[in-house]
Image (spheres, helix red, strand yellow):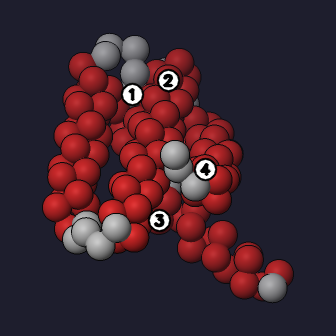
C-alpha cells in the first residue's frame, strides 16, 4: 500500500486546498453564481486529491520495482498518461455539467504550485 508519509502530505495538501477554495469561491462569487463556484472548487479539489493519490501510487510502485531491480520508466510514463486522461475526463465533466463553473474546477489543479513551496518555506524556518 501507499506510504503513510505520502498520505499525510496528500491530507495536508487537501486541507490547504480547501482553505484556498474559500478564497476562490469568495472572489468568483462576484462574477458567477455562488453554487457554481462552490461546486466547481470542490470538484477541482477532489480532482487534485485523486491526482495526488495517483502520484503516490506511482511513486510506491516505482520504488517497489527499483528494490526488485526493475526500471521504473515504463511505469512512470504509463501512470502519467493515465493521470492526464483522468484529469482530462474530469475537466471535460466540469465543462459539461451545467451547475459547475469550469474555471473554479480547474484552478485547484494549480494549487500545488502554491502549496508545496509555501510548505517548504515554513518547514525550513521551523527547522
Q: Upstream in the sequence, badge 1 or badge 3?
A: 1
Q: Secondary structure at mark 2?
A: helix
Q: From what the image shows, is residue 68 above or below residue 2? A: below
Label 2 neighbourhood size at 10 Å, few (<14), some (14-19), many (20+)?
A: some
Question: In x, y percent, where is residue 95?
Answer: 26, 26
Residue 62 vertical placement versus 4 (above, below): below
Whichever of callouts 4 and 1 sits on the residue coming sooner in the sequence is: 4
User: Looking at the image, is mark 2 or mark 4 earlier in the sequence?
Assistant: 4
**C-alpha separation, residue under disc 2 versus residue under disc 4:** 24 Å
* Residue farthest along the front direction in this orientation: 68
Q: Position of residue 87 (x, y in %)?
A: 29, 40
- The total number of labels drawn is 4
Residue under the point 27% across and 24% down = 93
Per the model, the C-alpha gap separating discs 4 and 1 is 29 Å
**Viewer-nearest residue: 116 or 56:** 56
Q: Which mark is residue 39?
A: 2
Task: Identify the residue under disc 4.
Answer: 7
| SS for dot 3 | helix
Quarter of the image with the C terminus is bottom right
Along the line of sight, which residue is nearer the eye, 74 or 83? 74
The residue under label 1 is 101
Q: Residues within 10 Å of mark 1 (few under 14, many from 20)?
A: many
* Distance (Cα) linking label 1 and label 3: 21 Å
Q: Which residue is mark 3?
A: 113
Residue found 40% across the figure and 62% down from its top: 64
Q: Position of residue 58 (x, y in %)?
A: 36, 55
Amino acid at each position: 500500500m501507499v506510504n503513510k508519509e505520502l498520505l499525510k502530505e496528500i491530507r495536508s495538501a487537501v486541507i490547504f486546498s480547501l482553505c484556498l477554495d474559500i478564497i476562490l469561491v469568495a472572489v468568483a462569487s462576484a462574477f458567477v453564481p455562488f453554487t457554481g463556484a462552490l461546486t466547481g472548487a470542490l470538484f477541482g479539489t477532489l480532482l487534485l486529491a485523486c491526482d495526488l493519490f495517483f502520484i503516490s501510487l506511482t511513486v510506491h510502485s516505482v520504488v517497489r520495482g527499483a528494490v526488485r531491480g526493475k526500471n521504473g520508466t515504463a511505469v512512470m510514463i504509463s501512470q502519467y498518461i493515465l493521470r492526464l486522461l483522468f484529469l482530462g475526463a474530469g475537466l471535460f465533466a466540469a465543462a459539461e455539467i451545467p451547475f459547475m463553473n469550469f474555471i473554479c474546477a480547474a484552478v485547484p489543479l494549480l494549487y500545488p504550485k502554491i502549496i508545496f513551496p509555501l510548505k517548504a518555506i515554513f518547514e525550513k524556518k521551523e527547522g
